Amino acid sequence: MDEVITKEQGKLLGFIRKRVGDEEDARDILQDVLYQFTAGFDDIRSVRSVTAWLFTAAAAGTRSCCRRLCARRFSRPPQR
């Protein structure tokens, strides 16, 4: 498990950062993905490609982040 995290962490962060554009949000999403990975490792290990699972989880995390950001942006009153 540690070997996979070490190998894929940099690529995952770049993948996420490219999609959300904010370093802090990207690191938060990466932390969530790695937590999901470690918490469910026994189940995930049976997945054919662990790397594919990680990137799928990262993509889902970026979509959730974008939805939250859009919701916040559109729920604020317009600035004058």
Image: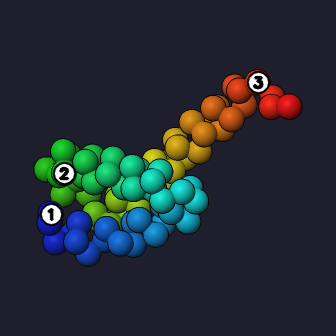
Count of numbered tags: 3
Q: For residue 38, which numbered disc appears in the image?
A: 2
Under circle 2, the secondary element is helix
Q: Is residue 5 left or right of residue 68?
A: left
Residue labelled with disc 3: 77
| Between marks 3 and 2 in the image, the one whose residue lies nearer the viewer | 3
Q: Position of residue 72 (x, y in %)?
A: 63, 32
Residue type indicated by callout 1: Met
In which quadrant of the rendered view does residue 11 lie? bottom left
Q: Position of residue 45 (x, y in %)?
A: 18, 57
Looking at marks 3 and 2 on the same chain, the residue that comes earlier in the sequence is marked by 2
Residue type indicated by callout 3: Pro
Q: Quadrant of the N terminus?
A: bottom left
Under circle 1, the secondary element is loop
Looking at marks 1 and 2 on the same chain, the residue that comes earlier in the sequence is marked by 1
> In this view of the protein, can residue 43 be seen by the observer?
no
Graded by Cα atoms within 10 Å as few (under 14), some (14 to 19) or many (20 or more), the crowding at tag 2 reads some
| Residue that sits furthest to the bottom in the current view | 7
